[in-house]
């Protein structure tokens, strides 16, 4: 049995389970005996004749786990009877970092339980998956959880009672952010790309473009100014004007040399995709050092973007689920060159939409998500504000392009003595 599965089973009864319906989580735990507790909320919404199942992805290899989790949803949606309901589910040890295990909760009508169980028996052959079924106790409103064996033909002898439990102090999706969604050193991100070289050949090409060491040997003589913000807040417009006004060099991020591989990595699960973007910052840092010896450098997006988009995607639900201000999640990577100033452009959402419409260009999936999902946009902006070392200085991008430029020039003169 895989190492992660074994450790999961050791802590099985200390684990909390969370099922999300329309973004709202319901939490439950398991215990040996029922002590008269009501059924958890999630089961009270289920007809007693319905069958429920949980599928938790638990491979010990994090690359395989990330790939399998992403593929599992597609597989379930393709193969399950249409009436089956699929909700995001997770299991975790409260307060224990990296203990989050993600998966899905299935609800099937009695008529669909045969094809559903046939599919689950196939899937359980994979060592990466733990399957449980949930049954209502006869003559009571209580539910039990049974863990399936790897053969899928029978259930484990132990049966657990399902009981409601309080929401944890920290949202479970925050437990695994460090080194799964956000990488705090060159080595951590590099390790992910090295390990996926055999399944993603493009990773090898990216690795060849990376600097040999992350730590900048020297600091640039000239100021380095990063411009951040959601899409269509005016970063391109402002960075080009700053370049022209200050006689600076403008560096895009991710760097141009990664363009051929970007679309490929955008298709990958967060672990791999975020490692790609994190490494892009180290290439940019090397370019900053080279150019910053000769002129001021303006950078269009950098670490704040990498971390904020990753955190906002990893944390489900509203911005109050984000790790609290001051959390280690918002710290700057110890080996990444720090800019002299980071400016965050903010814009009224309606004006941002108007500018997006006027621009009329195709949008990436994440940009479309920003458009449709107000919560996601709020989380990205809040994460931007919480990142420290350096923290960003917020500038309202609502006024005319020239007014925004003048305001940022004043900031640069104040903070960078330019
Ligand atoms: N201050 C401004 N007032 C009005 N319109 C602006 C202003 N700044 C930029 N725009 C217009 O808004 C649109 C988006 O601007 P821009 O492309 O500079 O944003 P961006 O932040 O670089 O977007 P993305 O990240 O998606 O590339 C463009 O059509 C641009 O001409
Ligand atoms: N340094 C960077 C730059 C960009 N990203 C990610 C964050 C978004 O997913 C997307 C936005 O880029 P744009 O559409 O403006 O080119 O790219 C990042 O993670 N790190």
Image: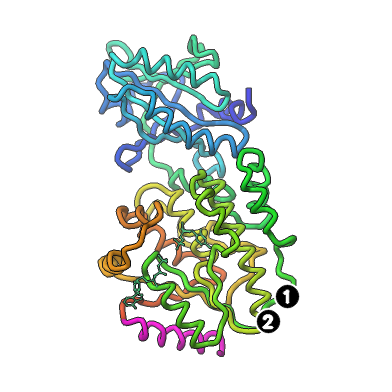
Please provide percent x and percent y for residue 112: 31, 16
Residue 103 visible in this rendered orientation of the protein: yes
| Between 274 and 290, the one nearer to me in the picture | 290
Label 2 environment density (alpha carbons within 10 Å; few <14, some 14–19, many ≥20): some
Q: Quadrant of ligand 1?
A: bottom left
| Between 269 and 334, the one nearer to me in the picture | 269
Circle 2 sits on which residue? 293
Please provide percent x and percent y for residue 64: 58, 35
- Residue 404's quadrant in the figure? bottom left
- Quarter containing the N terminus: top right
As drawn, 269 above or below 404: above
Residue drawn at point x = 56 percent, y = 90 percent:
417
Residue 91 visible in this rendered orientation of the protein: no
Residue drawn at point x = 66 percent, y = 57 percent:
186
Label 1 environment density (alpha carbons within 10 Å; few <14, some 14–19, many ≥20): few
- Residue 44's quadrant in the figure? top left
Q: Magenta segment, principal secondary structure?
A: helix
Label placed on residue 162 = none
| Camera-nearest label, 1 or 2 | 2
- Is residue 38 rendered to the left or right of residue 331? left
Q: Which residues are magenta?
A: 400-418
Residue drawn at point x = 63 percent, y = 68 percent:
285
Residue drawn at point x = 52 percent, y = 87 percent:
246
How far apart marks 1 and 2 lie (CA) works out to 9 Å
**What is the number of callouts on the image?**
2
| Between 110 and 371, the one nearer to me in the picture | 371
As drawn, 17 above or below 294: above
SS type, badge 1: loop
Please provide percent x and percent y for residue 78: 38, 28
Circle 1 sits on which residue? 218
């Amino acid at each position: 049995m895989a190492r992660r599965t074994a450790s999961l089973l050791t802590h099985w009864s200390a684990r909390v389970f969370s099922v999300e319906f329309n973004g709202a989580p319901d939490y439950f735990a398991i215990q040996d005996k029922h002590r008269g507790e009501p059924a958890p909320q999630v089961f009270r919404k289920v007809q007693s004749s319905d069958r429920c199942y949980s599928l938790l992805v638990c491979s010990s290899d994090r690359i395989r786990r990330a790939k399998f989790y992403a593929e599992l949803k597609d597989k379930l949606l393709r193969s399950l009877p249409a009436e089956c309901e699929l909700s995001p589910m997770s299991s975790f040890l409260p307060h224990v970092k990296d203990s989050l295990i993600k998966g899905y909760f299935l609800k099937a009508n009695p008529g669909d339980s045969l094809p559903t169980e046939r599919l689950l028996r196939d899937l359980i052959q994979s060592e990466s998956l733990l399957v449980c079924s949930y049954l209502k106790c006869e003559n009571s409103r209580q539910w039990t959880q049974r863990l399936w064996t790897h053969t899928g033909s029978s259930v484990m002898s132990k049966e657990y009672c399902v009981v409601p439990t309080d929401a944890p102090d920290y949202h479970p999706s925050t437990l695994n952010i460090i080194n799964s969604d956000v990488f705090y050193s060159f080595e951590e991100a590099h390790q992910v790309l090295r390990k996926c070289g055999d399944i993603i050949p493009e990773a090898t090409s990216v690795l060849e473009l990376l600097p040999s060491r992350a730590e900048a040997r020297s600091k640039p003589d000239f100021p380095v100014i990063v411009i951040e913000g959601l899409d269509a807040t005016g970063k391109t417009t402002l960075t080009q004007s700053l370049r022209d006004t200050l006689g600076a060099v403008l560096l895009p991020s991710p760097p141009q040399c990664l363009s051929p591989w970007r679309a490929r990595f955008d298709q990958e699960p967060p672990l791999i995709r975020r490692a790609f973007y994190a490494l892009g910052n180290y290439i940019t840092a090397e370019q900053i050092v080279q150019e910053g010896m000769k002129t001021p450098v303006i950078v269009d997006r950098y670490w704040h973007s990498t971390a904020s988009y990753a955190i906002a995607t990893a944390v489900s639900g509203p911005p109050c689920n984000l790790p609290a201000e001051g959390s280690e999640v918002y710290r700057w990577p110890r080996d990444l060159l720090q800019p002299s100033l980071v400016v965050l452009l903010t814009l009224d959402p309606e004006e941002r939409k108007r500018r997006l419409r006027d621009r009329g260009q195709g949008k990436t999936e994440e940009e479309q998500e920003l458009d449709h999902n107000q919560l996601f946009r709020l989380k990205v902006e809040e994460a931007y504000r919480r990142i420290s070392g350096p923290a960003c200085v917020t500038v309202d991008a609502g006024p005319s392009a020239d007014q925004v430029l003048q305001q940022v020039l004043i900031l640069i003169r104040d903070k960078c003595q330019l």
